[in-house]
Amino acid sequence: MDKIVGVHGIGKYHYYRDAGNSAEGAASAVREKWDRYLHKGLTGGVPYTKERYVTDIAYYAHLLCEHPQEPSARAVRAMDVPSQEIFVAWAKQLPRMGEGLTGALHAVTGWLLNRLQANAADLAGLFCPEVAAYMTAGSRAREKARAAVAQTIRRNQPKVVIAHSLGSVVTYETLWSNPDLRIDLLLTLGSPLGMQNVIFERLLPAPINGRGKKPPSVRRWVNIADKDDIVAIPAELRRSFTGIDQETLVNLDWLDFHSVRNYLGCGALNEHLKPYLH
C-alpha cells in the first residue's frame, strides 16, 4: 500500500490537550479517526477492525491557537478584531447575505444562529480565529504550521495527501514553498482556498490575474466539496485555480456539511484512493 498523509482542518486543538500537549499524540489520535471514517467510505459500512489506511497526520492546530475558546454564540461575538474581520468577510459570501454588512457582526451572528442553530456558531467560533491566526501577514504561526506539514510529508514521502478545510490552505502553501515535496495525488476536501477577501487574495504565492495554480510538485489535484458547505466557498475551485484535474460536488448533511467524518465516509474518495491501497 502506498503512503497516505492527512492534513487536518479546523477545531483540532483538543486532540493536543487530550494527549498531554503532545503533537505526536494528537496526530496519532486524529489518524485513528481518519482510518475509521475512510473505512466506512471504502467498504460501505463493513465493521471496522483497526484497518490502517492513513500513514500519518500532519498536525499543526497547536501552532495556531494556544488557548482557544470553546465555540459558542458568545465566543463568536467576543472574537478579537482580526477574527471579526474574517467573520464578516466570510459571512458576506453566504447565501442571501448581500454586501451591506460592514460592522454588523451582531446581526450576522444572529442570522447564522437562526439559519443553522448552534452548528454555525460552533463552526464560526473555530474557523475565524484559526484562519485569522494563519492568514495574518508575517504570521509566525503560518510559518510554523507550514513547517510542520512539510516535515510530515518529507518524513513519510507519501504518494497521496488528503487535506481537509484549512488544512488544504496550509498544504497548498507548503507544497509551493517546498517544491521537493512531490505528490502523486492531492485530495482537497471542503476547501476554502477560493474564498474571496478571506483567503484567496492572501495566499502565498499570490494569485496572478485572479488565478491560482496547482503546485508544480503535484501530479494530480482532485477537489471534493459539499455543495452547501459554508466553509468551501466557492465549492468549485476551478473558478479560481488552474490545474485542478477533477472536481466532485457531494451532498453530505444539511447540518453536518463540513466534518471530515462525512467527507472521508461519503465514498467520493474511493475511485481516487483505491489505486494506492493495493
Image (cartoon, rainbow, N blue to C red):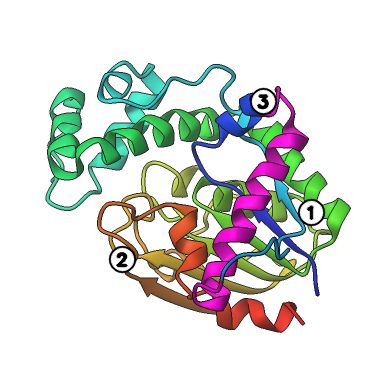
Give residue 263's position: percent from left, percent from top.
Answer: 46, 62
User: Can the viewer see residue 255?
Assistant: yes
Residue type, label 3: Arg
The residue positioned 71% from the left and 46% from the top of the image is 58
Does 194 sit left or right of 242 as displayed?
Answer: left
* Residue 173 visible from this viewpoint: no
Q: In this view, does 154 lie above or below 87?
A: below
Kind of element beneath mark 3: helix
Q: Earlier in the sequence, mark 1 or mark 2?
A: 1
Q: Quadrant of the N terminus?
A: bottom right
Mark 3 vs mark 2: in front? 2
Q: Is residue 134 left or right of residue 144?
A: left
| Quarter of the rendering occupied by the C terminus | bottom right
Question: Looking at the picture, which amino acid does disc 1 mark?
Answer: Ile
Segment colored magenta: 19-46
Which secondary structure dominates the residues rendered in magenta?
Answer: helix
Query: What is the quadrant of residue 218 in the picture?
Result: bottom right
The one nearer the camera, 42 or 247, is: 42
Residue 24 percent across, percent down from the top left = 77, 36
Q: Nearer the viewer, residue 33 or 214?
A: 33
* Label 2 packing within 10 angstroms: few (<14), some (14-19), many (20+): some
Point out the tag, 3 or 2, that comes first from the N-terminus. Answer: 3
Q: Where is residue 21 in the image (x, y as percent from the top left)?
A: 70, 23
Q: Position of residue 259 (x, y in %)?
A: 43, 52
Numbered circle sitting on residue 227: 2
Residue to which mark 1 is pinned: 153
Residue lying at 14% horizontally and 30% vertically, measured from the top left: 110
Earlier residue among tags 3 and 1: 3
Residue drawn at point x = 59 percent, y = 19 percent: 66
- Residue hosting label 3: 140
Picture quarter containing residue 184?
bottom right
